[in-house]
Image (cartoon, rainbow, N blue to C red):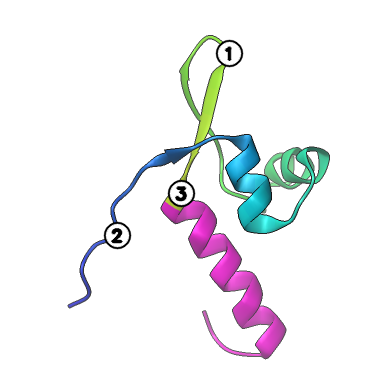
Amino acid sequence: MATEQLRRFIRLPQVQELTSLSRTEIYKRMKARTFPATVKLGPGHTVWVESEVAEWVEARIAEARGVAA
């Protein structure tokens, strides 16, 4: 059994760096429910779960390579 990945929160700049997507594209995909949703921690403090974003990236790579994710 694989060791469970540590879950941590990341902010928008880190999400953009991991995905190479613009802010606009990230929110557009979230609205279409094709990108991980944010977690609201308080007023003006919205984050993503790093492992969810990483899984999304891996799924895109698998799709591009024709491999089941």
Label 1 is placed on what type of residue? Answer: Gly
Instruction: Give the numbered dot on residue 17.
Output: none
Residue that appears at 20% across and 68% down: 3
Residue 24: quadrant of the picture: top right
Secondary structure of residue under mark 2: loop
Q: Secondary structure at mark 1?
A: loop
Which residue sits furthest top?
A: 43
Q: Which mark is residue 5?
A: 2
Which residue carries the number 1 mark? 44
Q: How many angstroms separate mark 3 from mark 2 (CA)? A: 10 Å
The numbered mark at residue 50 is 3
Residue 21 falls left or right of residue 33? right
Report the number of discs. 3
Among the 4 quarters of the image, the one containing residue 13? top right
Residues at marks 1 and 3, CA–CA distance in whole angstroms: 19 Å
How packed mark 2 is, by other alpha carbons closer than 10 Å (few <14, some 14-19, many 20 or more), is few
User: Badge 3: how crowded within 10 Å, few (<14), some, or many (20+)?
Assistant: many
Above-or-below relation of 35 to 12: below
Q: Secondary structure at mark 3?
A: helix
- Asked whether disc 1 touches disc 3, contact meaning CB atoms under 8 Å apart, the reply is no
Residue 46 locus on image (x, y percent): 54, 25
Label 1 Cα neighbours within 10 Å, binned few <14 / some 14-19 / many ≥20: few
Whether residue 66 appears in magenta in the rendering, the answer is: yes
Pick whichever of labels 1 and 2 is earlier in the sequence.
2
Q: Say what amino acid the circle numbered 2 marks.
A: Gln
| Chain part drawn in magenta | 51-69
The correct choice, above or below, for 21 with respect to 37 in the image is below
Q: Residue at x 28, y 53 (%)?
A: 6
